[in-house]
Image (tube, rainbow, N blue to C red):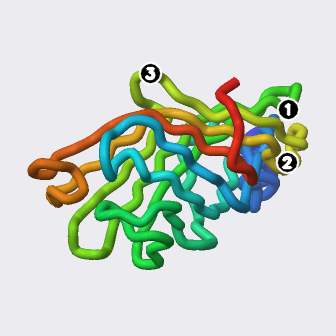
Amino acid sequence: MKKFAILAMLALELAVCGCGRSTPLNTVTTTTSGNWEAQLLGGTGPTSLLNFVTEFQVTTFSGQANQPLTFTGPVGFYNAGPCFALGDQENTQIGNASFNTNSAGQVTGSLNLTINSQSGNGNVLTLTTNGTPPGGVSGTSSGTINTTGTLANGVIWGTWKLTSSDPSCIPPSGGSATGTFIMCQGTNSCSIP
């Protein structure tokens, strides 16, 4: 009976100590926010003019599955066109990201982002780091084990795909267009590491 009581107390202590802990032990938490500028390469005609800027926040733990992006501003396209309107406030966007930070503060990971046009033409632009050729996330984090660091010098790259039923966006009869992209944190110029 005494052994059972000791085991029960030990289990209760472990349960109480574990309550409220949302960060796994021995992980680095990395967060990012602010402007990201995307340069899309490839496509023809209107689909070659899809560069945009967006603002989002995300916090992820190293080794954790994708976490949702929280958008803090609309996607703003730089070029007016039939696919997405210039600075279109009516676009909706969803996405997720996963950052892994090593002991030297180097960040790697993945990101997926989808932008839906709400102007009635059903255009959907998807950016992913999981395509061919492979993409990724790079940057540095000020975080250490069990602390939250901020991503700096962030670069995200991968592939994009636009689907549309609008022939003025993807001539001659709609369909899809593809290419590669690079997103730069807080600047309009960066390079894939």
Q: Residues within 10 Å of mark 2 (few under 14, many from 20)?
A: many
Say whether disc 2 or disc 1 marks the residue closer to the N-terminus.
1
Quick check: marks 3 and 1 in contact, CB under 8 Å?
Answer: no
Give the answer, above or below, for where 142 lies relative to 134: below
Quick check: marks 3 and 2 in contact, CB under 8 Å?
Answer: no
- Could you tell me which residue is drawn at 38 percent across and 48 percent down? 126
Q: Where, by quadrant of the figure, is residue 166 drawn?
A: bottom left
Relative to residue 8, is residue 103 drawn left or right? right
SS at badge 2 = strand
Relative to residue 170, is residue 127 drawn left or right? right
**Disc 2 target residue:** 149
**Disc 3 target residue:** 133
Quick check: marks 2 and 1 in contact, CB under 8 Å?
Answer: yes
Residue 86's x, y, as percent? 45, 70
Three-letter amino acid code of the residue under disc 1: Gly
* Mark identifier at residue 105: 1
Q: Residues within 10 Å of mark 1 (few under 14, many from 20)?
A: some
- Could you tell me which residue is drawn at 68 percent across and 49 percent down? 188
Q: Is residue 178 visible?
A: yes
Residue 74's x, y, as percent? 54, 72
